Image (cartoon, rainbow, N blue to C red):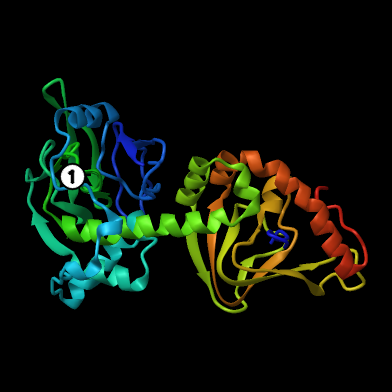
Amino acid sequence: MSQGGQDAGHNTPVNGRFRGRGQKRAGVYATSEQDDHMDVASDDDICDEPPPKRILDSYKRRRQSVCAERYDPDADDDDDDKKVVHPKSDEQRTRLAGAVANILLFKSLDPEQMQEVLDAMFERKVIPDEHVIDQGDDGDNFYVIDCGTYNIFVKINGADKHVGSYDNVGSFGELALMYNTPRAATIVATSDGSLWALDRQTFRRILLKNAYKKRKMYETLLDGVPMLKTLEPFERMKVADALMTQSFEDGEVIIRQGDSADCMYFIEEGVVRIAMKNKNADDPDKELEVTRCKQGDYFGELALVTNNPRAASAYAVGKTKVARLDVHAFERLLGPCKELMKRNIELYEEQIHEVFGSKLHLQETQ
């Protein structure tokens, strides 16, 4: 609707283990705040290399530069680096695809970037007691577990302390590559196993640059949303870091009237058609179009503000890209904007009145 629409980290290890695919996982990590500089934190299904803050801070004091120069995405030219390709058999590609399926770091890559990552990954076989990475070493590769079990050790007061384990699933090693810090933990294989490794240069060029470009794109998108003008620049930056792109084909349902709400959307590209049914109409199943939203508009916020089910459905018109903000980030980051959103409710009710000839009270429980 008018600049809006009708409703349509890192982890810190504690004792525990990661279960294999399809198994329930006991808690291994306690979630910490998302990094403010790059949207690359892990989700509940993926485990990062554990970086206890006190240890990471001590390394930063001791060694300010350990790997390479600070990464500057603006200065990075893709043509300067020859793409790395490690040939793989069909069997290896099948295993690799399964291993990376739930890696959050890869979620925002487009198909071409994902293919480049898969081409660049190479297999590393390990045996029991083999050290995959050692705390304090410079970072060379990011690792995704294909199979095998692994123990995580952190040196505390000069002694190696076992702080967690991986069991046939997980990923580790990204922190040293992202922040030019030494390895924050030691990972030791406890069985025969297989890992997929991605070299430092490819990791930084594709994953970090992609995250940087995504943030810049989201910041530009959010700068054009009047509602967010009430936020400070650093607050809009945090909103940008919390967004996730989703694509929809023509006619595809983005949200459905009556469903519970778990997110809101900002339109990156395309058009979204907002339509709804009026239960008080002669034909309660007849759906009428209320309005259309374009690039820079947002929709889906009404149900989050009123704590009601979705008041309308939203459909993609042509190929459409939207940026999704989940309810937890909405409540945490958009608190200052809620009053402005509530003011939009009257506008929405007027638009509904024009379509149906009767006014619905959207703040009432539906």
Q: Is 298 above or below relative to 130? A: below
| Residue at point 50%, 57% (across, down) | 220
| Residue at point 50%, 65% (across, down) | 246
Side of 27 where 65 appears, left or right: left
| Residue at point 12%, 24% (across, down) | 159
Give the tally of numbered discs.
Answer: 1
Q: Is 204 above or below relative to 130? A: below
Q: Position of residue 8 (x, y in %)?
A: 69, 62
Q: Kindly identify the amino acid type of the residue bearing the numbered disc 1.
A: Tyr
Q: Is residue 244 visible?
A: yes
Q: Name the one closer to the observer, 125 or 362.
A: 362
Q: Residues within 10 Å of mark 1 (few under 14, many from 20)?
A: many
Q: Is residue 366 visible?
A: no
Q: Which residue is mark 1?
A: 150
Q: Quadrant of residue 352?
A: bottom right
Q: Quadrant of residue 11?
A: top left
Outermost residue, front side: 75
Q: Quadrant of residue 53?
A: top left
Q: Position of residue 133 (x, y in %)?
A: 12, 44
Mark 1 element type: strand
Outermost residue, top side: 157
Q: Position of residue 206 (x, y in %)?
A: 27, 62
Q: Position of residue 115 (x, y in %)?
A: 28, 72
| Residue at point 64%, 68% (across, down) | 294
Q: Identify the image quadrant of the N terminus.
A: bottom right
Q: Name the one closer to the observer, 9 or 19.
A: 9
